[in-house]
Image (cartoon, rainbow, N blue to C red):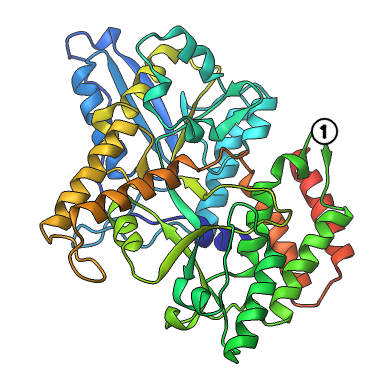
Amino acid sequence: MAYLMLCTILLISACAGKEQGAGNVAPEDGNKGAAEQKTVTVAVMTADPWLMTATRKFEELHKDIHIEIKEYRAMPQGGDGMAMPAMTEGDMEKFVQTVTAQALSGDASDLIEMSNLPQDKFIEKQVLVDLNDLIGKDASFDKKQYYENILQTSQLGEGLYSIPFSFYLDRVIKANASLLNEANIAIDDNTWTWDQMKDIVKKLRSQTGSDAPTFSMMPPAQMLYDYISANYSKLVGQGSLNFDTDSFRDTMRQIKAMYDEGIMSTEYIMDESKGLFALHGLVEPASAMTDLLRPNTVFLQMPSFDGKPGGFGYRTLQMFGINSKSKVQPEAWEFLKFLLSEEMQASPELGGYPVHKSALDKKLEEVRQMIERGEIPVPEGQPGPETLQQITQQLEQILDNVQPKAPADFKVSAIAIEEFQSYMSGQKSAEEVSKLIQNRVSTYLNE
């Protein structure tokens, strides 16, 4: 269940289908130049329409390179051409186990989709190429064209081992500005903590007399996952594990206390105007700009457990690394660069925000014009040009404030969440659960 819970927390399912077999057909033996054509294999859980379109366009430009997409869970098609239900827990676990085994045995694809794979283990076993070496030797690639804070997502030390193509903001707090103003509450979201959030809730309740849930869509597993993501290098790193520690146990107790005291609730608040906070996602330019136009609403960074600013939370949608044992590394790098080109980054098929700044500027301008023409409905009235410009700048400032984060192993998080459920239910103590997590993660990492 932990894998399924993490999939629910992390993944946005795409509804569009793809043409069967596109990009997967090997060149015919009779084709001129077929003997010189090189094949780049690409391992992905599921190939989305953007990747398939990029594959077709790249092959049209590079007749000497064939891109072979190796899907481990092809997206099934319904009768109306729409995709059927998304991946299951078993699908994800099988993908992680299969690709990890291939990589560690030296039999991996040339390009590997790394989002949910144990990158630390791959780096330790020298499975991945340090992309900084390729970037440093390639004068045609300018890192300044990109959101470097996002490109650094997979950086470990001085090495960059995979590159994301797009991202979305998923750990954003949507706050009720009217209730905050009514209670004369000001929040500095650069430093606020979960303890301060508890005090804010108590103050609001004492002034309004309300006992309604004040936080919507924040399950305990989400809070623990956020803590692990923010502190992964401390919990799993430098040759030691730190789950069986007082600090980790205190975090579990802090999370549980907020639900036991009724500060947090697992119930969904249908009418968010009655609540103070809600977990929200600014997932792509159009919906983000309409959200930022909502009256009486302010968007804040997530509280931390230690008061250290973490920036706005984000997820990358796809991250590709190059197999260090690949015999077609130059060709694999050319394909990666094409995926990062302004043309493919500006594609409407690319979900979330592109990492290419000029491509994002184009998308924001398109959204702004569509709102002006009334093609995108907005919450309250038609905003003027000045308001739209302010909203665009606000969104750009949020994106600039996204902080690089250490990549967390999907399996480690799943183990912790699975054991954490028994603590939240009262079946096991914090000491028992922390030791179980420590032992299980140690066994997994030493496999």
Q: Which residue lies furthest to the front in this view?
A: 184
Residue 68 left/right relative to 134: left
Give the residue displayed 68% in from the left and 24% down from the top. 125
Q: Quadrant of residue 35?
A: top left
Find residue 258 and report its horizontal and vertical position in percent. 71, 74
Q: Is residue 215 above or below residue 244?
A: below
Q: Residue furthest bottom?
A: 209
Find residue 5 and report its horizontal and vertical position in percent. 57, 63
Amino acid at pointer 1: Gly
Q: Is residue 317 visible?
A: no
Q: Which residue lies furthest to the left in this view?
A: 373
Q: Between 294 and 331, which is closer to the camera in this rendering?
A: 294
Give the residue displayed 30% in from the left and 39% down from the top. 360
Q: Quadrant of the C terminus?
A: top right
Q: Between 115 and 19, which is closer to the camera in this rendering?
A: 115
Q: Between 441 and 370, which is closer to the camera in this rendering?
A: 370
Residue identified by numbered label 1: 239
Q: In this view, does 216 lie above or below 390?
A: below
Give the residue displayed 18% in from the left and 62% down from the top. 80
Q: Quadrant of the N terminus?
A: bottom right
Find residue 278 and report its horizontal and vertical position in percent. 50, 70
Residue 310 left/right relative to 74: right
Count all numbered tags in the image, as a single digit. 1
Find residue 63 and report its horizontal and vertical position in percent. 22, 15
Q: Can residue 306 be seen in this view?
A: yes
Q: Is mark 1 on a helix, strand or loop?
A: loop
Residue 437 left/right relative to 350: right
Give the residue displayed 60% in from the left and 62% down from the top. 222
Residue 443 left/right relative to 116: right
Dot 1, crowdedness within 10 Å: few (<14), some or many (≥20)?
Answer: few
